[in-house]
Amino acid sequence: MWQYEKKLQYPVNIKNPNPKYAQIIVSQLGGPDGEVGASLRYLTQRIAMPYSQITGILTDVGTEELAHVEMVSAILYQLTRNLKPKEIEDSGFATYFVDHTTGIYPVAASGYPYTVAQFQSKGDILADLHEDLAAEQKARATYDNILRLVDDPDVCDAIKFLRAREIVHYQRFCEALGIAQDKMNSKNFYGYNPAFDNVGK
């Protein structure tokens, strides 16, 4: 189903490690609006989607989110490589380091570990698509917040790319919502899944 190219979707080349930056950027890996949750959300929602065009959009975006998991992980790795014990202690990175060394682990910036309770797959067309639209805007807002706190141009370059892709994903889900509304009749306009038309008969 997928072809995997052994390179990042967009290059990550960070010259200066900075564990303080890593502690905030990690939220876009395992935080409530991060890339792990996004990929799981879309790749699970696609299975119950009754319209093939929307299934395709969910597959495209969900797959790209996996590429973003790789990118954020590369950013985190490059920000924390070759740290000395004093740098770890002075930066506040010690609490992460003691549990994970510099391994990539999905947590929020608050330290709360990723949980699948952070995303929804309802099986209701409109509910799922509105969830997806909101998720993309929340991810974009998180990248905005990161850009307010980070001034390393190497880091900002990769973060700006990821932020731009959230906007594209939002537009794709707007397209999906339009497709769904065009296909719905008065009976199922509010998100009723046509697969269940015979339920209760």
Image: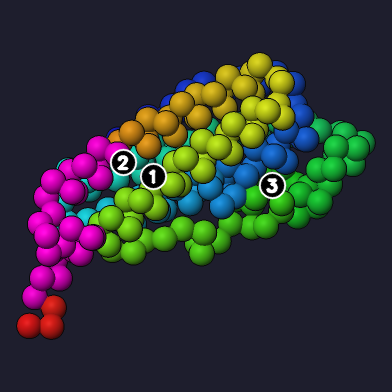
* The N terminus: image quadrant: top left
* Labels 3 and 1: the sequence-earlier one: 3
Q: Secondary structure at mark 1?
A: helix
Q: How many residues crowd mark 2 within 10 Å: few (<14), some (14–19), many (20+)?
A: many
Q: Between tags 3 and 2, which lies in front?
A: 2
Task: Decide whether residue 195 is among the magenta residues.
Answer: yes
Amino acid type of disc 1?
Answer: Leu
Residues marked 2 and 1 touching at CB (< 8 Å): yes
Q: Which residues are magenta?
A: 173-198
> Residue at the location (55% across, 61% down)?
115
74 or 198: which is nearer to us? Answer: 198
Residue 109, labelled with which disc? 3
Alpha-carbon distance for marks 3 and 1?
Answer: 23 Å
Amino acid type of disc 3?
Answer: Ala
Q: Between tags 3 and 1, which lies in front?
A: 1
| Residue identified by numbered label 1 | 133
> Residue at the location (53% across, 47% down)?
33
* Labels 2 and 1: the sequence-earlier one: 1
Residue 194: image x %, image y %? 13, 63
Residues marked 3 and 2 touching at CB (< 8 Å): no
| Count of marks placed on residues | 3
| Residue identified by numbered label 2 | 173
Viewer can see residue 105: no
Q: Secondary structure at mark 3?
A: loop
